[in-house]
Amino acid sequence: MPDTPTQADYSLQGKATGRLAAAPELPYRPPTPRVYRPGIGLIGCGGISEAHLKAYRQAGWDVRVLCDLVSERAERRRREFFPAAAVTTDYRELLRRDDVQVADVATHPAERVEIIAAALESGRHVLSQKPFVLDLDTGERLAALADEKGLRLAVNQNGRWAPHFAYAREAVRAGLLGDLVSVHCGVHWDHTWTVGTPFEDVEDLVLYDFGIHWFDFVASLLGKRSATRVQASRGRAQGQKARPPMLAQAIIEFPGGQASLVFDAHIPFGPLDHTYVGGIRGSLHSAGPNLGEQRVVLTTASGRAEPALEGSWFPDGFRGTMGELLRAIEEDREPLNGARENLRSLALCFAAIAAAHDGQARVPGQVRRLPLPPVRSSPT
């Protein structure tokens, strides 16, 4: 028979975890190739390309060509980061160059598929911007094309190398938490800077363009365990002027556990980002005022450990995605952020968006395309 419940049981105090423990050393830092130094060509020099190029310059990688339909954008990036790089407005010209072995495709999704396919056909390894594709079947075809050509295709899910996410992932992979039971993330911040920008044209801005990082985080923790069902909702925040809904949440069920994602994108004061990952042998909690400043606490039977993590999401996340691709090419293996791996993340995301549109739970993988709402919402 169990012991009589105590006051500590009723008040959810749990087991004592007051003693401090040494923080395990885990390989959470962005990977880098040992000797492989290919020529890199960047296709698409919009706003996010600044993070790409800053990371590549810090890593000492060789960016040979910058391509954008608007030549001045490419010229500006060349002046800022790689003065010796060539500039072109035609990605096909970039793909004809012998000194480019890796194409970094950072265009919008609508143009991206054609460019990725052309890059693979030309014999280049590819890093695709996220979200990878608008439908899973297209993504599978691109992954199959990469296999056919003996090339590597990876996705720029840069959140995978945000220090707190990367440390949590490696803690799970090392077995420190045991079998996973829960993953819970809350992001509370002000996303109203998107008003008046092209981001307002993204109907499910929070769940799709932003939230894909968190769906990818969950997928990276689950490993071979597949999510079985996703429920989600979205709504407009009080007083919001942005066209897309600024509130969203998702519940993900997987065998023996659950995950939740909550996004409040209309909080002007007191931003907070927190993550909780729990298993049968331990838990990890991370919290901070933004995505770059996080305090991580790992709790196991050994006690409480607080690793002093180095780096931040920007630019380390971008160094991580390209670095992992280059390391995978060098080691002739599939990258951790490979295309097929990312399709698992998109399957969660698409299922959540479909569920948010009509209130019906979805099975990941059955929603093959990015769902569009039957009627577009309008600001009130």
Image (cartoon, rainbow, N blue to C red):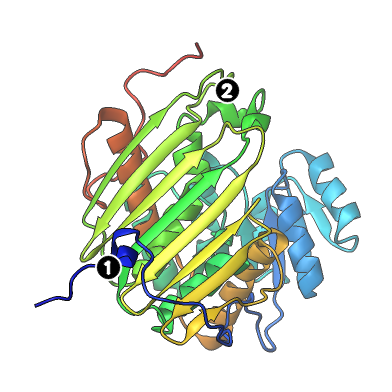
Q: Is 292 situated left or right of 224 in this image?
A: right
Residue identified by numbered label 1: 6
Is residue 366 shown above or below 358? below
Residue identified by numbered label 2: 242
* Count of numbered labels shown in the rendering: 2
- Taking the spot 34% from the left edge, 68% from the top edge, the residue there is 222
- Which image quarter holds the N terminus? bottom left
- Taking the spot 54% from the left edge, 26% from the top edge, the residue there is 201
The kind of residue tagged 2 is: Ala
The kind of residue tagged 1 is: Thr
Q: Is 186 situated left or right of 345 in this image?
A: right
- Taking the spot 66% from the left edge, 74% from the top edge, the residue there is 309
Percent across and percent down for residue 285 are 50, 65
> Looking at this rendering, what residue extends furthest in the top direction?
380
In the image shown, does 194 or 128 lie closer to the viewer? 194
Q: Secondary structure at mark 2?
A: loop
Cα–Cα gap, marks 2 and 1:
50 Å
Q: Is residue 104 visible?
A: yes
Is residue 358 shown above or below 41? above
